[in-house]
Image (cartoon, rainbow, N blue to C red):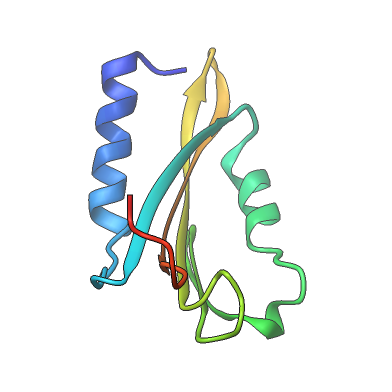
Amino acid sequence: MNSGGDAFSMEAQYIRRHHRHDIRDHQCSSALVKHIKAPAHLVWSLVRRFDQPQKYSRSSAGNILGIKIVGGDHRLRNYSSIMTVHPEVIEGRLGTMVIESFVVDVPEGKHRG
């Protein structure tokens, strides 16, 4: 993987640039970063293949995928996710940094932590 400080700096830059959400008082959000020992084009081909895409509102531009689930009677009410795929070098080989951020309504009876 890249040196610790450099990788963290790139993660922060990508999150600031591509992972902007309008978070309301009744919502929570988070982001997850995963480093994968596979080339970005291969990872992207799997990320963009979403089972049953007709059920979701999707948008895809470059290596950025956005998904929204609006309303619903389930735990993912008003779920919005952004996933980005970024090439990197891991242990001298082609690798990929995948970042997913999301916003979702906090279920009734629960509190934001």
Q: Nearer the viewer, residue 104 or 93?
A: 104
Q: Residue furthest right?
A: 51
101 on left or right of 37: left
Picture coordinates of residue 65, whole percent (x, y): 50, 65
Q: Nearer the viewer, residue 55 or 108?
A: 108
Picture coordinates of residue 16, whole percent (x, y): 23, 51
Give the vertical position of 107 relative to 12 (above or below): below
Q: Nearer the viewer, residue 70 or 34?
A: 70
Give the vertical position of 58 relative to 34 (above or below): below
Picture coordinates of residue 32, whole percent (x, y): 45, 42
Residue at horizontal 23%, vertical 70%?
25
Give the vertical position of 81 relative to 36 (above or below): below
Residue at horizontal 64%, vertical 62%?
48
Picture coordinates of residue 111, whole percent (x, y): 35, 59
Residue at horizontal 49%, vertical 24%?
89
- How many labels, in total? 0
Q: Quadrant of residue 94?
A: top right
Residue at horizontal 25%, vertical 54%?
17
Q: Nearer the viewer, residue 62 or 81?
A: 81
Q: Residue furthest front?
A: 109
Q: Quadrant of residue 50?
A: bottom right
13 on left or right of 41: left
